[in-house]
Amino acid sequence: MHGEGQEEVTFDMAKAAKRKMKSEQVKIGIIGGSGLYSMAGLTGVREVKVKTPFGDPSDAFIVGTLEGRRVAFLARHGRGHILSPSEINYRANIFGMKLLGVEQIISVGAVGSLREDLAPLDFLVPDQFFDRTKGRDATFFGGGIVAHIAFDKPTCPRLSAQLASACDRVGVNVHRGGTYVCMEGPAFSTLAESSSYRQLKFDVIGMTNLTEAKLAREAELCYATFAMITDYDCWHPGHDAVTVDTIIGYLNKNSENAQNSIREVVRALDDEGGCKCRSALAHAILTDRKRIPASQKKRLAPLIGKYV
């Protein structure tokens, strides 16, 4: 990956609805998690610092061309892994993607396995989440405007299917569907918690992706995730024998597999739509349009401009 420059995008509340970074034409966003802090194969790269009404994203967006498509890559934890799951500004990350013109987000995250048959180095493409976070900012709404999105199917079925198919084509062992339980962290589970999640038939455990999925749905973005399995959670009898070196080795291999899979997804990704993700707010805003504060209309213009 080589650089060609840096620019800053400042969120202009008066012009937000009209502004879509036309010069970039970025429609695909990639969010990298633990072990994936950059995207190999990007060319024509520039760093774009995006200012949002919700503060600064985790890092500058790395915008470039991958497999002939313009993409925006963001390191969820910041380069150097400086942000814990609870410190990530999820709203700024997703809003920043929206401002860049992104329509589909491919998310990558390291997870622990809650099933014997989901082994380290396998990938899971989950279709359900279970929320165990505590008090995160997981909505763009409030302050005089109320919206209730449908979230029974929290990931985009079309995009998820394409992620799984890409894994098959590049030789990554992938499992389709399953429940990702999202805990607060940063500490890992107690044995009692891990055992209870297994009794509830959950499949993997992580700390980030549910919050992203909620905000992506409010932003009317298609969202799907590669859950990269690095280890078994503490329920497993062999848990104590796993060393830090082993985990790092799995992270590195998973990162390689994720990059191969992402390149394959981007290369073959269709943009046919057909899902409900991109009209999620059509019937979700309950507030009388006349009662929505003008300041909120401007603040959320990239999300709600076509409805209010």
Image (cartoon, rainbow, N blue to C red):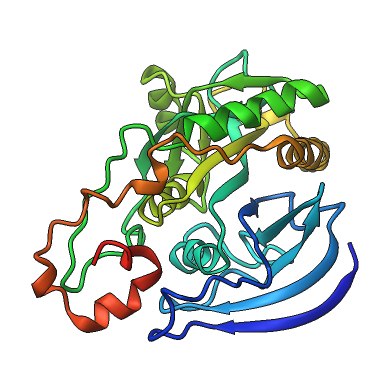
What residue lies at 45% left-to-right and 36% top-to-bottom?
A: 155
The residue at the far right in this view is 2
Q: Is residue 218 above or below residue 87?
A: above
Whether residue 204 appears in this view of the structure is yes
Q: Nearer the viewer, residue 184 or 33?
A: 33
What residue is rendered at 78% in x and 41% in y? 263
Look at the image and tell me in which quarter the N terminus lies: bottom right
Q: Between 158 and 78, which is closer to the camera in this rendering? A: 158
Q: Position of residue 251 (x, y in %)?
A: 76, 41
User: Which percent across, then down, holds residue 196?
Assistant: 38, 25
206 vs 6: above or below: above
- Where, by quadrant of the figure, is residue 142 drawn? bottom left
Locate residue 58: give its quadrant: bottom right
Residue 39 lies, in percent from the top left, at 79, 54
**Residue displayed at 44% across by 47% down:** 213
| Percent of width and height locating residue 186 | 52, 53
Q: Quadrant of residue 182?
A: top left
